[in-house]
Structures are given as C-alpha cells and as structure tokens.
Image (spheres, rainbow, N blue to C red):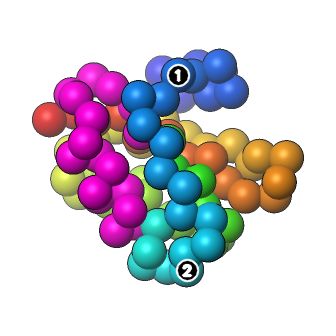
Amino acid sequence: MANEDLSTLEAAKVVDARGSACPGPLLEAKKGIGAIKVGEVLEIWSGDARTKEDIPKWSQKVGHEFLGSLTAEGGYDRIFVKRAK
C-alpha cells in the first residue's frame, strides 16, 4: 500500500491544521479520525515539520494505518491515515 500514488487518493475528510503548531495537528487528526468510517482515509494538512513524525507514531500506537505524506505546492505537508478500527 505504501507505493500507492497518494496524490490520487480520495480522502473521506481533510483536516486543515496549517495554522497550528505541534501538538495542534495531532489533536486535529485525533478529532478527524473519529468523524470517518473504518477503512476511510483522513488527510491532514500541516505546516509543522514535527507532524510528519508524530502522525505515524500515533497511527501505529492506536492501530490506524499510516499511508504516507506528500509535500503540497504551498509548502505544507499532506499526511494520509486510514482508519483501521
């Protein structure tokens, strides 16, 4: 799954946390994941570099699937997590 083209992935919900510093994007992701169904994808937008480290760790800890991240044209990160439970 890691090699799937993330740029074509359809997220069920997008959380825009670009104006938020750590741990804001992670808190937004926690709220956002609760709003989607199991098997759906949450996309988190963040300008905080730590988010790319925090989200995979959090995903693994709580049992969701971290799919990867992309850098968007605006210079922020697009991070993808699939809800697993």
Q: State whether residue 76 is above or below residue 68.
A: below
Callout count: 2
Q: Residue furthest left?
A: 85
Q: Residue sitting at 57 percent across and 22 percent down? A: 9
Q: Is mark 1 on a helix, strand or loop?
A: loop
Say whether residue 33 is magenta.
Answer: yes
Instruction: Give the percent coordinates (x, y) of residue 24.
Output: 44, 75
Q: Which of marks 1 and 2 is nearer the N terminus?
A: 1
Residue 45 in the figure: left or right of residue 66 = right
Residue 9 in the figure: left or right of residue 81 = right
How far, Cα to Cα, is label 1 from label 2?
25 Å
Q: State whether residue 31 is above or below residue 80.
A: below
Residue 10 in the figure: left or right of residue 59 = right
Q: Residue sitting at 25 percent across and 42 percent down? A: 35
Count neighbours of disc 2 (C-alpha within 10 A) and say few if under 14, some if 14 to 19, many if 20 or more: some
Instruction: Give the percent coordinates (x, y) of residue 40.
Output: 33, 26
Q: Residue sitting at 49 percent across and 79 percent down? A: 22
Residue 10, numbered circle: 1
Q: State whether residue 36 is above or below residue 69.
A: above
Quadrant, the C terminus: top left
Q: Is residue 38 visible?
A: yes
Instruction: Give the percent coordinates (x, y) of residue 46.
Output: 60, 61
Q: Residue furthest right?
A: 73
Say whether residue 12 is magenta.
Answer: no
- Judging depth in this view, the residue of 13 and 41 nearest the camera is 13
Amino acid type at circle 1 is Glu
Residue 21, numbered circle: 2
Residues in magenta, as a range: 26-42
Instruction: Give the percent coordinates (x, y) of residue 5.
Output: 65, 21
- Judging depth in this view, the residue of 70 and 31 nearest the camera is 31
